[in-house]
Image: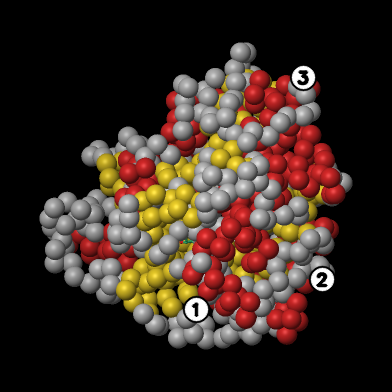
Amino acid sequence: MSGKTYPVPADWAKNALIDADTYEEMYARSVNDPDGFWAEQAKRLDWIKEPTIIKNTSFDPVSIKWFEDGELNVAYNCIDRHLKDSGDRVAFHWEPDHPDQPGQTITYTQLHERVCRFANVLKSLGVKKGDRVTIYLPMIPEITYAMLACARIGAAHSVVFAGFSPEALAGRINDCDSTVVITADEGRRGGKTVPLKKNVDDAMPHALGVEKVLVVEHTGADITMKGGRDVWWHEAAAGVDDFCECEPMNAEDPLFILYTSGSTGQPKGVVHTSGGYLTYINFAHRAVFNYEDGDIFWCGADLGWITGHSFTLYAPLSNGATSVMFEGVPNFPDASRFWQIIDKYEVNQFYTAPTAIRALMGAGDEYVTKTSRKSLKLLGTAGEPINPEAWEWYHKVVGEERCPIVDTWWQTETGGCMLTPLPGAHGLKPGAATAPFFGIKPQLVDNDGNVLEGAAEGNLCILDSWPAQARTIYGDHQRFVDTYFTTYKGKYFTSDGCKRDEDGAYWITGRVDDVLNVSGHRMGTAEVESALVAHDKVSEAAVVGYPHDIKGQGIYVYVTLMAGNEPSDDLLKELRTWVRKEIGPIATPDLIQFAPDLPKTRSGKIMRRILRKIAEDEFSNLGDISTLADPSVVEKLIDNRQNRS
Ligand code: 6R9
């Protein structure tokens, strides 16, 4: 924790939408009178039927409903309601992977027409209100059409990040019984292509419920189209009407499912609903980023993750904003790419992940300083803890000390930002997520559930519901209850560790469960382990994280081989490739150690605590190892540990 605090700059205190006094007054009202507070915020949206019941929630037993008698359509709120006055306003500046490729500008009127066509195509493929549609698309405009088309006709979308493997895709298709999958011929990222349609083809033998695959032509690559199943989007779009009515949806009808990693087993299909989700993120977009009409907003997150769902798509569009959407990566063709895009579109608010900031910091200041960035007013980060050094660089070199940084802590399950400084209200502490957003009641508890007051470090819980909270895990409500509300009964347990300092500011210290955060991507150690043991030469695997300069955490793997197999460089490569194939490139192990034995308790449980310490190079103090079945295993592991440099 760095001791520094940057006070709220005078012009921000004066001109921001929310200053310190307003924050205190509004926060008090949000927690003392949630009904009154959120009824007022709900007026930000256009309702078909205004809600009269606002909050109806309990964490014990678990039942979460917001605005339950309200009716609305999310796509209407994101598009149609802006058409009358602002149809010509740009909704998205779409920036391609390489600056020499043609970009696109999409106005709200154009967005409306394309989303309507997309909706009509989905209907023609048999999609109805209440169905689930899997979207496996790269960061191209069509992914926004596909998501909004689902919202328009009342189908829940399940976006699967286009970096996931065919195996991972098939699992997610099956879990929510999608009969329609939307993909593209290929994706582009950093000058490389990703064979999306081929991945879908490879997933099909494992996803037998899929009836139709809708394919967007993007790179023009040669792909195979299967008769009767595969449909080109551009051909289908030409044959449908350019208007489609919005389906009236109950506030509690699902808007989307998004799969995320937990500490055990299969990824969970986190379910978000319509009215509460949109109200909360619409408001957060204004309050956290100080978004004002006319600003150009850029959230760099991929639509495969929650940050993309909420802040690349739904929040900015529901506020009628002009957003930037970027297909590529921060360092291609070179490390100036982000800053050049900011200059090109005169971006006012820029939101990205600490891992990107660390990587760009490593490339050198000149890539930044040769650009102007004078349009920037505010910077944001999300996804993982930001180290103070990267924060200072972002603040000084990128934002020229003129732009406040909002370090927003939240989760797939929370839908929107939960802890964050507000730029006009809170002094900034590099690395601190700082203060609760409206309606959020954080609490720190120790491992036994005792409440910790004042300056303390413990496990972060949230005491009461907020409108954008996930409602369930698709198909497994009991898992929802067990995962989030059982460790500390009656409280939402975030699985994050957290410190509160003397000033009451919150500092997230990272996950306290077996979830890794690699470059801002959540990954269960259990998922990587089960991919490894599926390899026929592997008998056992244990996966832990270790500190990594750029990725935040790297993936350290201990592998025990089946009898008759010897460690070799070829096998190392084979295992790396295997994990990439099973899960996707983001899960590629950084370090693999062949371990003839793993440290286990007498009851056979792997002692991860010890494996973590060895991976972190902190083995001088391993704690009590006397409960191990064979303590000598540890020394061998230390002797053979993988070098990180
Ligand atoms: C939005 C998102 C959630 C996990 C979360 C925490 C970590 C997110 C953070 C942060 C420190 C921040 N996390 N934001 N840690 N400071 N500002 O990333 O959702 O992909 O579900 O990840 O990410 O550990 O529990 P998700």
Report crowding for label 3: few under 14, some 14 to 19, many 20 or more residues within 10 A (C-alpha): few
Could you say whether the residue bearing mark 1 is in a helix, strand or loop?
Answer: loop
**Label 2 vs 1, first from the N-terminus:** 2
Given residues 19 and 517, the one toward you in this image is 19
Residue 405 x %, y %: 64, 72
Residue at left 62%, top 21%? Answer: 125
Which disc, if any, is residue 505? 1
Under tag 3, what secondary structure? loop
In the rendered image, residue 644, in percent from the top left (x then y), is placed at 44, 64
Residue position marked by numbered label 2 in the rendering: 374
Pick the residue in front: 194 or 289.
289
Q: Is residue 448 visible?
A: yes
* Circles 3, 2 touching at the beta carbon (< 8 Å): no
In the image, is residue 330 above or below residue 287? above
Residue 407, image x, y percentages: 58, 69
Task: Using the rendered view, name the quadrant where residue 105 is placed.
Answer: top right
How many labels sit on residues? 3
Q: Secondary structure at mark 2?
A: loop
- The label on residue 239 is 3
Going by the numbered disc 1, the residue's amino acid type is Ala
Q: CA distance from mark 3 to mark 1?
A: 56 Å
Measuring 19% from the left and 56% from the top, which residue is drawn there?
A: 600
Q: Residue at x 32, y 34 (%)?
A: 536
Quarter location, residue 17: bottom right
Which kind of residue does numbered mark 2 sit on? Lys
Asked if marks 2 and 1 touch (Cβ < 8 Å), the reply is no
Q: Earlier in the sequence, mark 3 or mark 1?
A: 3
| Residue 320: image location, x then y, percent | 76, 52
